[in-house]
Amino acid sequence: MTRPPAEGALAPTPGGPAGVEKPRLRGRGRGPARRGRTASALVLLTAAVAAAAVLSAATGAVGVPPLSVIGVLSDHLGLGTLGVDVSARHDAVIWNIRLPRVLLGLLVGACLGCAGAILQGLSGNPLADPALVGVSGGAAAGAAAAIVAAPTLLGQWTVPAAAFLGGLLATSVVYLAARRDGRTEIITLMLAGVAVGAVANALVGLAIFTANDQELRDITFWSLGSIGGATWTALAAVAPPGLIGLVLALRLARPLDLLALGEREAAHLGLPVERTHRQAVALVALLTAAAVAFTGIIWFVGLVAPHLVRLVGGPRHATLLPASALVGAGTVVLADLAARTIAVPAEVPLGVVTALVGGPVFVLLLRRTRNAHGGWA
Amino acid sequence: MTADPAAGTAGETTGDTTVDAAGEPVLTAAGLSVHTSTGRLLDDVTLTVRAGELLAIVGPNGAGKSTLLAALAGDRPAPRTRTTGEVSLFGRPVGSYRPGALARLRAVLPQSGTPRFPFTVSDVVRLGRAPWPPDRDRDDAAVGTALAIADVAHLTARRCTDLSGGEQARVSLARVLAQDAPVLLLDEPTAALDLRHTENVLMTARRMADAGRAVVVVVHDLNLAAVHATTVAVLAGGRLRALGSPAEALTSTILTETYDHPVTVIDHPLRPVRLVLPGGLPAGQPLPPQSPEA
């Protein structure tokens, strides 16, 4: 590559800072311009996700015009129906059935996408999935244990609560197992996650072994994921941990950027590395456990969403974290739409749809990025 | 040599810490030892780095150079090692600083590593500003200066994962320079560089020192140490074998012993520096003219 000799570099120009050649920050370099572009990209993405949500809410056994969906929503927010003619039946279908489902799908998808982005940033590994820190396995074990042992202990909250706690517990075990002399090696964390995941899997197996037919169905369907059970109550339960987790996650953008340089480098730049590890693992656990508590395991969203975003928007976490949440949200809503429309009147498990589509998409992404930059997206 | 762009901003951006008081002790190691279960990586190292000094640490593989640099940087000790003795930065134990405050006082270039995701060069160098409160003008100035000094300004839009090893090393150097700290610790910054960029890095380091910073650099090339350093520390087996000016520390006797290989040190025929050459002199060959210390 030929270029002009960099005199400015070898022999600094007289006159100190003023004489230094104006930095040539081309393309994505400039701060304000880039921030503007990032913001408009996020707005566009939000609009697309909102459109997907409206489409999903409008589609089903009772067809509702998309405008009516917006009318119902605005009516319930106290803004009137915006001049849209909404029938009582449509109102009931949208408000009581579809909307909680769509909103739960959005929230769950956002949590999974964001958790995936955090974990991939934390581990520096674009193949990391929230399942790797044991949280999904722990949640599955908790859910299975609750289904078999005491399905009515807390009424309808039993299984979600057991799944949520199981996920957090498993991640705590993983974290403590990986901790030594006040530090956690991320690779050890991942391996401990695999081990805890295996134990959790065995516990699920044990639950299956003792289950009767109905319990067996319940366990199986839980592990395949579905947001069919969405209610306003379920949404109200998932929203606090989910939304808090999402907001806190944004604060990890700079720390995760620094960690991408390497842990030593990050420490040299003033990052309290161990505290960042702890916060990131806790957030991944919170987001994932909240996401799967009511819906069961939904594969591939946390793995693929950050990949897609990185491919288009680059690796900066200030963009990656919110965009992964948005892409995850859109993905789950569309996958749910597919899950309940491709085999009417039956409903295909959501996790089956995401895995069926996500697997091949992931392989394609991987091959594309490998051609472009040696496998690292 | 004209005014150095980076040095120009040093006084104002480093706040209370006066870096222009050349000769002040800035970084000291006192009785520093690092033990493992099987032996010592560092054995009772005592040295002082002053403002205005470019200290080159040289020595054979495994002599403890990187261990010493890491200890000077205040890195948390490696697993299963025990550190005794003390490292002080601006008069305070290096471990007593909060991470952010430490990062505003000393920048470290570890042996090369590539970012784990394809960040652009501009993003990477900008991360060097992380320790400082955001200030767009000052950040832009520091980043621009660092890009120019490390000769990577033409690469800003490139992904750092697509660069050659030498280019990556220069990007890392630019990130360290953007940090704008009064103490610079560079671990083999020239390992992947061509001749021109090697010279550029060492000349930059020397200019930083001349402008009042304290710079510590680990190098393998003894001639680089001889030409550019103000002070040379020769490490062997974790011990400080010699510490002094290049003329004092880089002698045939010391180096032959340290490297367990014959080394000849002669005066450069045209410039007032030493030349270090591997190998002894043929039998019966008279010694070339040398200054008394060699």
Image (cartoon, rainbow, N blue to C red):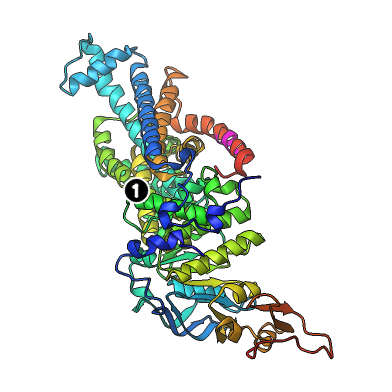
**Residue under the point 62% across and 64% down:** B191
Q: Position of residue A297 (x, y in %)?
A: 43, 39
Residue type (three-letter) at the residue carrying disc 1: Arg
B291, A103: nearer the viewer: B291
Residues drawn in magenta: A362-366
Quarter of the image with the C terminus of chain A is top right
Q: Position of residue A204 (x, y in %)?
A: 45, 47
Q: What secondary structure is found at the residue carrying circle 1?
A: helix
Above-or-below relation of A14 to B211: above
Above-or-below relation of A281 to A345: below
**Residue under the point 38% across and 63% down:** B10
Left or right: residue B162 compared with residue A72: right
Q: Position of residue A196 (x, y in %)?
A: 46, 55
Above-or-below relation of B179 to A130: below
Name the residue that disc number 1 marks: B136
Q: Circle 1 marks a residue in which chain?
A: B
